[in-house]
C-alpha cells in the first residue's frame, strides 16, 4: 500500500499517528512505553568494557548475567535434534517440556501438585501476559496492580489489548503492599471513572522491590479478589531467586489457594476458574533470550483458548526439547539454583555495602535482582520533574542507567530501581564507585546555587 494510505481500489484509510500508514492501533506501538527505554537502547550500544572505559553501566534491565556460564555449559550438551523438532507440535507446549516444567515448579517453589496438563507454554512471560489479558479482559476494563510495579506491565496490558492499569498505592511504606480495603477503594474509584476492574496482578517476589508477600497478606488479597469475581494472576518469575533472610518465606499463590479450599474458604471450582500463575525461564535461569514462559491454570476455558491462540506465541520445538532435557536433570537444577542464589546474594551485598558507605538509603531486599534506592535527598524539590532531572544527571555524568520510580508508578518522587545482576561483580563495583563519587559531588554542591535542569 502506498505511504499516503491509498489502497488498490483508490480508497484511503484514516491516517494514523504522525501521518503513518499504520492502523490507529498499530500507530500506538510507535512510541516507547517509557522515556527511559530510549536511554536503555542507547546504552546497550555503548556499554562499558575494558576497551570502552567511559561506556554505560546498564542497571535498568531486569536480566541476570551472574550464572549464565552454568546454563551455557549445560544447554550446549542438551542440544539433541530429533526429527520430530521439525514438525508442528502442541501449541500449548510440547508434552515433554510441560512435564519437566511442571515437575520443576512443584519441587522447587509451588508447594502443590502440578499437573502438566495445566501448563501452557509461550514465548516468554510477556507473551503469556499478553494472551492472558486478551482472554480475561475486555478492552477498557482494568487490572489492579500494587504499586510500585514493573514498568512494562503497562505495555503488556494496553499495547494490544487496551486493558487499563489501575495502580494501587500502598498506605504502608514499610511493606509497600496494599490491603484488601485499599484494593476495594481502588475498584470503587476506578468505577467512578467508568473502568470495570476485571483482575488483580501480583508479582511475588516483587519487582522493583525484591521483597516477598507474607502468606497472610496473600490470603487476604486472594479471598477478597475471588469473592469479588476477579481473576487473580500471580507472576512468580523470580520464585527461585531467594537469597536473604526474611520473616516471610516465599509462598506460591497456588499453595495459598489450595489451603483456602481445604479450609472451606473458597470452592475448588472458583479457584480453578479464577486463580492462575505465570512463570518463565528468563530470570531465575538467566535465559531471557530463549523466550520461554508458562501459565499454570486449571481453567478449562483458558486451556482451550491457549490451544488455539498459543500458535501466535509458540516456542520452537528445538528450544523446548533442549530445555526439557536440562530441567529433567534435577541434580543440575538444584545445584544451579543454590549457586545462583549465592551469586545473587554476593552482588546484592556488594551493592548495599557501597550504598551504606555512601550514606544512601534503600529498602532491604531478599529476593529477585533489584534494590529500591532512595535518592530523595538529592532532589532539588520533591517533584517528578526533579526526579527526571536527577535521573538524567546520573545518566549523563555517571553514565549509569537506572529505572526512575515514576516509571514504576510510585506516588513519591526520588526513588529508583537498581538491577545489580545485569553485570558481573567487578563491573558492579565500578558502577557503585561512579555513583558514590556523583553523590559526594552533589552533596558538596548543595550550598552552591542549583543549576537549572534543562530538559528537552
Image (cartoon, grey):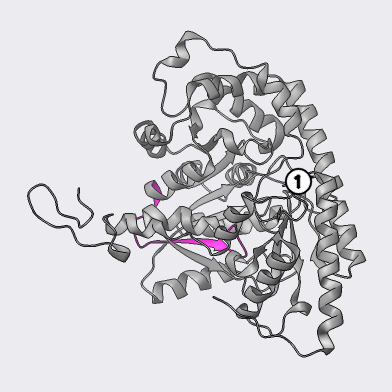
Q: Please give the range of residues in magenta.
A: 135-150
**92 w.r.t. 55: above or below:** above
Let me know if residue 229 is in the magenta part: no
Total number of numbered discs in the rendering: 1
Percent coordinates x, y for residue 285 in the rendering: 68, 35
Front in this rendered view, residue 276 or 208: 208
**277 w.r.t. 172: above or below:** above
Q: Residue at x 54, y 56 (%)?
A: 152
Let me know if residue 143 is in the magenta part: yes
Q: Assign the C terminus to one quadrant of the image.
A: bottom right
Q: Residue at x 57, y 44 (%)?
A: 261
Q: Residue at x 48, y 21 (%)?
A: 317
Q: Quadrant of residue 140?
A: bottom left
Tell which residue pokes out farthest to the left in this image: 9
Front in this rendered view, residue 342 or 65: 65
Percent coordinates x, y for residue 437 in the rendering: 85, 67
- Secondary structure state at the residue bearing disc 1: loop
Q: According to the image, label 1 marks what residue?
A: 49
Percent coordinates x, y for residue 118 in the rendering: 50, 31
**411 w.r.t. 32: above or below:** below
The answer to whether residue 123 of the structure is visible from this angle is: yes
Percent coordinates x, y for residue 109 in the rendering: 69, 37
**10 w.r.t. 312: above or below:** below
Front in this rendered view, residue 394 or 110: 394
Tell which residue pokes out farthest to the right in this image: 357
Tell which residue pokes out farthest to the front in this image: 51
For mark 1, does the 10 Å Cα neighbourhood hold few (<14), some (14 to 19), or many (20 or more) residues? few
Q: Quadrant of residue 28?
A: bottom left
Amino acid at each position: 500500500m502506498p505511504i499516503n494510505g491509498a489502497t488498490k481500489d483508490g480508497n484511503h484509510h484514516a491516517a494514523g499517528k504522525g501521518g503513518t500508514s499504520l492502523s490507529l492501533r498499530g500507530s500506538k506501538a510507535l512510541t516507547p512505553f517509557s522515556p527511559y527505554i530510549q536511554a536503555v537502547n542507547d546504552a546497550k550500544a555503548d556499554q562499558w568494557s575494558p576497551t570502552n572505559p567511559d561506556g554505560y553501566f546498564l542497571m535498568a534491565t531486569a536480566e541476570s548475567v551472574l550464572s549464565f556460564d552454568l546454563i551455557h555449559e549445560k544447554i550446549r550438551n542438551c542440544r539433541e535434534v530429533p526429527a520430530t523438532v521439525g514438525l508442528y507440535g502442541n501449541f500449548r507446549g510440547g508434552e515433554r517440556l510441560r512435564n519437566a516444567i511442571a515437575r520443576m515448579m512443584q519441587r522447587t517453589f509451588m508447594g502443590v501438585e502440578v499437573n502438566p496438563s495445566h501448563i501452557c507454554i509461550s514465548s516468554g512471560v510477556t507473551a503469556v501476559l499478553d494472551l492472558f489479558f486478551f482472554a480475561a479482559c475486555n478492552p477498557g476494563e482494568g487490572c489492579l496492580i500494587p504499586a510500585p510495579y514493573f514498568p512494562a506491565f503497562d505495555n503488556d496490558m494496553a499495547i494490544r489489548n487496551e486493558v487499563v492499569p489501575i495502580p494501587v498505592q500502598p498506605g504502608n511504606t514499610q511493606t509497600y503492599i496494599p490491603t484488601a480495603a485499599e484494593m476495594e477503594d481502588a475498584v470503587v474509584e476506578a468505577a467512578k471513572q467508568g473502568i470495570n476492574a476485571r483482575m488483580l496482578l501480583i508479582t511475588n517476589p516483587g519487582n522493583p522491590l525484591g521483597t516477598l508477600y507474607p502468606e497472610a497478606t496473600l490470603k487476604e488479597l486472594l479471598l477478597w479478589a475471588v469473592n469479588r469475581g476477579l481473576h487473580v494472576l500471580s507472576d512468580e518469575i523470580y520464585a527461585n531467586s531467594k537469597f536473604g533472610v526474611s520473616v516471610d518465606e516465599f509462598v506460591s499463590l497456588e499453595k495459598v489457594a489450595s489451603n483456602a479450599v481445604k479450609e472451606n474458604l473458597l470452592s475448588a471450582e472458583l479457584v480453578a476458574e479464577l486463580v492462575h500463575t505465570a512463570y518463565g525461564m528468563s530470570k531465575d535461569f538467566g535465559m531471557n533470550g530463549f523466550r520461554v514462559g508458562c501459565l499454570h491454570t486449571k481453567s478449562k476455558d483458558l486451556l482451550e483458548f491457549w490451544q488455539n491462540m498459543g500458535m501466535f506465541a509458540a516456542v520452537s520445538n528445538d528450544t523446548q526439547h533442549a530445555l526439557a532435557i536440562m530441567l529433567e536433570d534435577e541434580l543440575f537444577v538444584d545445584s544451579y539454583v543454590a549457586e545462583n542464589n549465592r551469586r545473587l546474594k554476593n552482588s546484592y551485598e556488594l551493592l548495599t555495602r557501597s550504598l551504606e558507605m555512601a550514606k544512601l538509603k534503600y529498602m532491604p531486599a531478599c529476593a529477585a535482582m533489584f534494590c529500591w534506592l532512595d535518592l530523595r535527598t538529592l532532589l532539588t524539590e520533591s517533584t517528578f520533574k526533579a526526579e527526571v532531572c536527577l535521573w538524567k544527571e546520573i545518566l549523563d555524568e555517571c553514565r549509569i542507567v537506572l529505572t526512575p520510580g515514576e516509571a514504576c508508578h510510585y506516588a513519591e518522587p526520588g526513588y529508583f530501581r537498581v538491577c545489580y545482576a545485569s553485570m558481573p561483580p567487578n563491573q558492579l563495583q565500578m558502577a557503585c564507585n561512579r555513583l558514590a563519587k556523583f553523590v559526594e559531588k552533589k552533596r558538596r554542591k548543595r550550598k552552591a546555587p542549583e543549576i537549572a535542569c534543562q530538559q528537552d
